[in-house]
Image: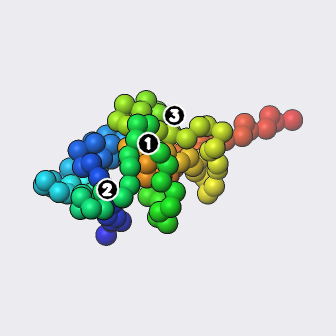
């Protein structure tokens, strides 16, 4: 089994491109009002909200943080720093390095997708082995 989530979006094209390029999710199926992206571990369905709902929230460039949502998607990535230019090109943004924290052998940092949804990035910490003590 794999994890799955549904994210309701205002603009399908930019959001599909963002999740595809930033997290390596492949487009499995697409239509006018939805896009299903997949990896070995994830199925993410992006569904366009009805116009009446879309009118209740604004999107901006750069995206404004939408923190009122009680859910935050999280993705394992090889490099948080490596994603900064990719996300910027696709309309998202990674929070500053000062906001990063370490927990359970992972470096964590939040980012925003093009519509301002907060997403957590998780990068493995590389711990170097301590040098062996010299024989006496």
Please state which of the two labelled residues, at mark 1 or mark 3, is closer to the viewer. 1
The residue sitting at 62% across, 44% down in the picture is 100
Quadrant of the image occupied by residue 130: top right
Residue 111 position in % (x across, y down): 49, 45
Choose between 34 and 36: the one closer to the eye: 34
Secondary structure of residue under mark 1: loop
Question: Mark 1 packing: few (<14 Cα in 10 Å), some, or many (20+)?
Answer: some
Q: Residue 81's mark? A: 3
On screen, 56 above or below 24?
Answer: below
Residue 115 position in % (x across, y down): 38, 48
Numbered-mark total: 3
On screen, 113 above or below 134?
Answer: below
Residue designated by label 1: 63
Distance between the alpha carbons at the discs numbered 2 and 1 = 16 Å
Point out the tag, 1 or 3, that comes first from the N-terminus. 1
Q: Mark 2 near mark 1, Cβ–Cβ under 8 Å?
A: no
Decide if residue 36 is on the left or right side of residue 54.
left
Q: Residue 55's mark? A: 2
Please state which of the two labelled residues, at mark 2 or mark 1, is closer to the viewer. 2
Q: Residue furthest left?
A: 31
On screen, 70 above or below 117?
Answer: below
Point out the tag, 2 or 3, that comes first from the N-terminus. 2
Quadrant of the image occupied by residue 134: top right
Choose between 20 and 71: the one closer to the eye: 71
Secondary structure of residue under mark 3: helix
């Amino acid at each position: 089994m794999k994890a799955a989530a549904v994210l309701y979006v205002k603009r399908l094209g930019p959001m599909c491109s963002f999740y595809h390029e930033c997290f390596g999710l492949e487009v499995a199926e697409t239509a006018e009002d939805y896009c299903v992206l997949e990896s070995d571990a994830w199925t993410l369905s992006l569904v366009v909200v009805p116009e009446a709902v879309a009118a209740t929230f604004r999107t901006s460039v750069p995206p404004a943080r939408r923190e009122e949502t009680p859910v935050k998607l999280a993705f394992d990535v090889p490099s948080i720093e490596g994603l900064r230019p990719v996300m910027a090109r696709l309309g998202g943004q990674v929070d500053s390095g000062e906001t990063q924290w370490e927990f359970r052998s992972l470096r964590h940092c939040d980012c925003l997708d093009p519509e301002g949804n907060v997403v957590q990035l998780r990068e493995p910490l590389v711990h170097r082995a301590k040098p062996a003590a010299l024989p006496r």
